[in-house]
Image: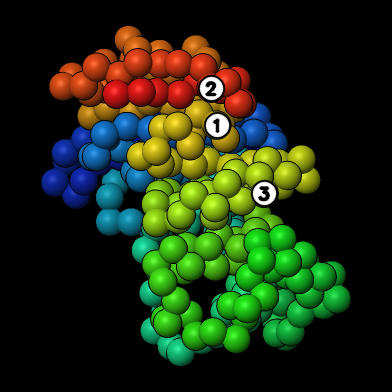
Amino acid sequence: MIRVSGFEVRSQSGKSLLSSTDLDLPAQAVLGVYGPNGSGKSSLLRGISGEASPVVRSGEIVIDGVPLNLLSSPADRIKRVLYLGSDFRSAFDLTVRDLFELGIESASGRFWPGLNPGERDRMAGVVERLQMVSLLPRVFQTLSDGEKQMVMFARALIQAPKVLVLDETFSKLDLDRLISVTRIIRDWINCGMTFLISSHDLNFLSEISDQLVFLKEGRIIAGGPVDSVLNESNLRELFTKVAPHVVTSPESGKRKILY
């Protein structure tokens, strides 16, 4: 589904932000990306999603058999891969419903705006599943930071890209919302979507991910299935001043860290 070959990122001044990176991720899976601040997580995820940036990129990224650099129009790109960060603003006083409908229209690439019945049903399903009906008439700018993150996550699901890239998108969610997000992502995987997620909450990533990548100083120090990557040796290489312990959750059977 996603193949990254020799991908590098440098600043305009020539500083290396991400060393030559190779990755393969199958369809209908979750890749968790973890590392200290400045380790290259956003450089990797923005590059995979084709987000505009002043940095210099090289290497090849292929999504669903199509090289990313051949997706010339934004509409073609966001049908395959969509990037979400963590901070969201709107220059206009748009309601949540407005944002959802504009997201569908931008993803459709149609000349005439307006939603078809299938798109309306998809929007209604996501809104109901995430219990967001009461937010629909609210002006986006009046929402809390956590509510804004949930709204933009819902908008991305409604747009239905093949790959959804979530870069610290859930950093301000409470526990109830985070549990809801975990469940809905696993359900959307079964419907055909693929997710790349970065977070500083390693226990969240271990719960939701099929594979993990650990980044430090712009290079991958470990990658693969969660159980093979999430161990004390790799964690000590990431963080030299902490002594984390890896345990198995009695509830989910997934690996967790204590420190």
Dot 2 lies on which element? loop
**Can you tell which quarter of the image residue 103 is in?**
bottom right
Q: Is residue 110 above or below residue 148?
A: below
Discs 1/2, front = 2
Please say if the residues under marks 2 and 3 sit with CB atoms less than 8 Å apart.
no
Q: Earlier in the sequence, mark 3 or mark 1?
A: 3
- Disc 1 marks a residue whose amino acid type is Glu
Q: Is residue 129 above or below residue 242?
A: below
User: What residue sits right under mark 1 in the picture?
Assistant: 207
Dot 1 lies on which element? helix
User: What residue sits right under mark 3 in the picture?
Assistant: 184
- On the rendered structure, is 153 left or right of 107? left
Q: x, y (%) of residue 195?
A: 58, 42
Please say if the residues under marks 1 and 2 sit with CB atoms less than 8 Å apart.
yes
In the rendered image, which quarter contains the N terminus? top right
The answer to whether residue 167 shows anywhere in this view is yes
Q: x, y (%) of residue 192?
A: 75, 43
Check residue 110 in the rendering and tell me which mark sits there, or answer none.
none
Q: CA distance from mark 2 to mark 3?
A: 21 Å
Check residue 249 in the rendering and tell me which mark sits there, or answer none.
2
Dot 3 lies on which element? helix
Residue drawn at x 63%, y 70% as measured from the top left: 132
Residue drawn at x 32%, y 10% as measured from the top left: 233
- Disc 3 marks a residue whose amino acid type is Ile
